[in-house]
Image: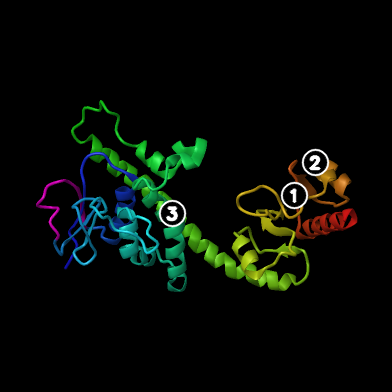
């Protein structure tokens, strides 16, 4: 049976049904997305998917609400919102629709669920307090999407629907960018693992271009690597490796004598012809050739050895 209607509630909107709509409208682009509380449309039928409204959850009947008591729970006991229910049922098909390779699909499905979907579920159910984000709480995705609702005194009778559909395009960009980023990380991991093997015992990792590399370092247990070099446009960069994504601290800093220098001053301080820039925080340097950047990398390693 062809899906002709995607049905969610009318009135104000939240991140969970908005993000659910991103998934479903990608899979069923010809279906009408109807925001309503008309009981005729909230009755399950083979031609419609109902979500975040309707008072029940049944994947078989294609109705995905979570407001009933008891509400649907994950295997670990954490609550679903409509987004989590829709992702569990349709997420794999959504990834396929975005041309995510089948070999990477399950891992990306799980990662997106834990990193993106679950926080939405918890916030929507009140199982996580927005205050955990501290001063950034107004900049979380649910808060930003919620800020797109119409103001209270908007006189338009279609204000809620107009705002919902405008927000849908913005929500779609976040979901698709996140999925594409996860797929890119999966592609990068294989390239980085090959580069790690080629580096051997060297503390310098050379990559063919800028790319995510942390997960590959962790997978390979490559704790000996201290710096990464790669081309960037017509230049080459030398980067420190952060201890984690949650800190700016690095495994090793570039030499203090280079900090904040550019061009001739950096060439003189480093002794490398073609050195162009070193950030004052000593996490990145730039040179005009591969030979120059590798020379800088080797000097940075030597400086660490001398200081040890």
- Residue 117 percent coordinates (x, y): 40, 55
State the image quarter where residue 159 is shown: top left
Given residues 173 and 121, the one toward you in this image is: 121
Q: Nearer the viewer, residue 170 or 152?
A: 152
Q: Main secondary structure of the magenta part?
A: loop
User: Is residue 209 depicted above or below 15 in this figure?
Assistant: below
Location of the C terminus (image quadrant) = bottom right
Crowd class of label 2 (few under 14; some 14 to 19; many from 20; radius 10 Å): many
Q: Are marks 1 and 3 in contact (CB under 8 Å)?
A: no
Question: Residue 25, percent across and down?
Answer: 28, 56
Secondary structure at numbered mark 1:
strand
In the rendered image, which quarter contains the N terminus?
bottom left
Name the residue that disc number 2 marks.
Answer: 261
Q: Secondary structure at mark 2?
A: loop
**Residue 187 visible in the picture:** yes
Q: What residue is drawn where x is 12% and y is 47%?
A: 38
Residue 64: x %, y % from top left: 24, 57
In the displayed structure, does residue 276 sit left or right of residue 161? Answer: right
Q: Answer yes or no: is residue 213 visible.
A: no
Q: Reading the chain from its start, which is encountered first: label 2 or label 3?
A: 3
Residue at the spot of label 3:
116
Question: Residue 250 location in percent, x, y?
Answer: 71, 52
**Label 1: few (<14), some (14–19) or many (≥20) C-alpha neighbours in 10 Å:** many
Numbered disc total:
3
For residue 41: magenta? yes
The stretch in magenta equals 31-44
- Closer to us: 223 or 272: 223
The residue under the point 39% across, 50% down is 122
């Amino acid at each position: 049976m062809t899906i002709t209607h995607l049905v969610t509630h009318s009135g104000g909107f939240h991140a969970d049904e908005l993000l659910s709509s991103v998934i479903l409208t990608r899979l069923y682009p010809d279906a009408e997305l109807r925001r309503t509380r008309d009981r005729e449309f909230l009755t399950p039928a083979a031609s419609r998917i109902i979500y975040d409204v309707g008072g029940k959850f049944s994947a078989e009947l294609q109705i995905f609400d979570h407001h009933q008591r008891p509400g649907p729970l994950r295997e670990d006991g954490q609550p679903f919102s409509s987004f989590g229910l829709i992702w569990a049922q349709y997420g794999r098909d959504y990834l396929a629709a975005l041309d995510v390779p089948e070999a990477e699909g399950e891992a990306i499905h799980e990662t997106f669920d834990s990193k993106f979907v679950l926080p939405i579920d918890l916030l929507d159910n009140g199982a996580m307090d927005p205050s955990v984000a501290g001063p950034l709480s107004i900049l979380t995705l649910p808060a930003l999407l919620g800020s797109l609702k119409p103001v209270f005194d908007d006189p338009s009778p279609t204000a809620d629907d107009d705002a919902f559909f405008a927000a849908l395009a913005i929500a779609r960009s976040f979901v698709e960018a996140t999925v594409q980023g996860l797929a890119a990380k999966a592609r990068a991991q294989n390239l980085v693992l090959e580069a790690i093997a080629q580096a051997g015992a060297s503390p310098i990792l050379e990559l063919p271009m800028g790319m995510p590399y942390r997960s590959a370092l962790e997978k390979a247990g490559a704790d000996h690597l201290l710096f990464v070099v790669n081309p960037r446009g017509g230049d080459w960069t030398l980067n420190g490796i952060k201890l984690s994504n949650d800190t700016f601290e690095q495994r090793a800093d570039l030499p203090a004598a280079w900090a904040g220098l550019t061009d001739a001053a950096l060439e003189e301080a480093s002794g490398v012809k073609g050195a162009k820039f070193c950030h004052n925080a000593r996490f990145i340097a730039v040179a005009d050739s591969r030979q120059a950047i590798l020379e800088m990398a080797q000097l940075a390693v030597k400086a660490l050895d001398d200081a040890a």
